Image: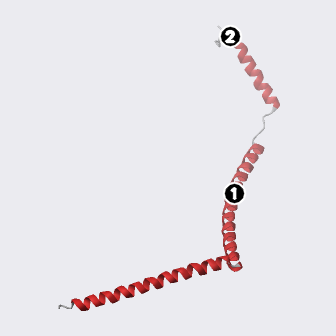
């Protein structure tokens, strides 16, 4: 009546079909895991794993090397600039220093011990 028996049979068929598909999927996953483990323990799999790890380490080392070279070049340029400016900077004359010292000695002589001028 109203097709309930037919709907129940279809539901049972779908349920059985779903169970078989789930069982087949579980077996497929198990076979996949076993094949991956077998491949990983073979010499080819170990070599592939080693090469992948090596390429990763090399790329990380290249990045660190570039960073260090950039920092070192900036420091080297700063060092060259400071050396150049120290070389170009005019050096004081010893005769001019003596004249400046003489004037400062005379200025100290004109001041009393409290820093006030002694002139009247």
Residue under the image location 67 percent in, 60 percent down = 64
Looking at the picture, tell me which residue is in the foreground, 70 or 56. Answer: 56
Residue sitting at x 77%, y 23%: 101
Q: Give the quadrant of residue 16.
A: bottom left
Q: Measure the C-alpha gap from mark 1 to mark 2.
A: 59 Å
Residue 114 against residue 96 in the figure, above or below: above
Q: Residue under label 1, please give it.
A: 68
Label 1 packing within 10 angstroms: few (<14), some (14-19), many (20+): few
Determine contact: label 1, label 2, CB under 8 Å. Answer: no
Q: How many labels does the image show?
A: 2
Left or right placement of residue 90 versus residue 6 in this view: right
Q: In this view, does 74 lie above or below 52?
A: above
The furthest residue to the left: 1
Q: Which colour scheme is used?
A: secondary structure
Which residue is at the far top? 120
Q: Where is residue 61 in the image (x, y as percent from the top left)?
A: 69, 63
Which is nearer the eye, 82 or 68?
A: 68
The mark that comes first in sequence, 1 or 2, is 1
Residue under label 2, please give it: 113
Position of the N terminus, as image quadrant, is bottom left
Disc sitting over residue 108 in the figure: none
Q: In this view, does 114 lie to the left or right of 6?
A: right
Instruction: Pinpoint residue 107: horizontal percent, then vertical percent.
Output: 71, 17
Secondary-structure class at tag 1: helix
Most foreground residue, 53 or 77: 53
- Residue 78 is situated, as x and y percent measured from the top left of the image, at 70, 50
Instruction: Reply above or below: 21 against 97.
Output: below
Res 54 quadrant in image = bottom right
Furthest residue in direction right, as rendered:
94
Residue placed most toward the observer, 25 or 83: 25
* Neighbour tally class for label 2: few under 14, some 14-19, many 20 plus, Cα within 10 Å: few
């Amino acid at each position: 009546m109203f097709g309930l028996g037919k709907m129940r049979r279809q539901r049972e068929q779908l349920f059985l079909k779903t169970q078989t598909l789930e069982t087949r999927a579980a077996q497929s996953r198990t076979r996949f895991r076993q094949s991956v483990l077998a491949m990983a323990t073979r010499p080819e799999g170990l070599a592939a794993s080693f090469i992948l790890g090596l390429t990763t380490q090399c790329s990380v080392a290249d990045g660190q090397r570039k960073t260090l070279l950039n920092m070192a070049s900036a420091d080297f340029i700063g060092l060259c600039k400071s050396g150049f400016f120290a070389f170009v900077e005019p050096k004081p004359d010893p005769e001019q220093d003596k004249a400046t010292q003489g004037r400062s000695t005379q200025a100290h002589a004109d001041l009393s011990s409290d820093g006030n001028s002694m002139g009247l």
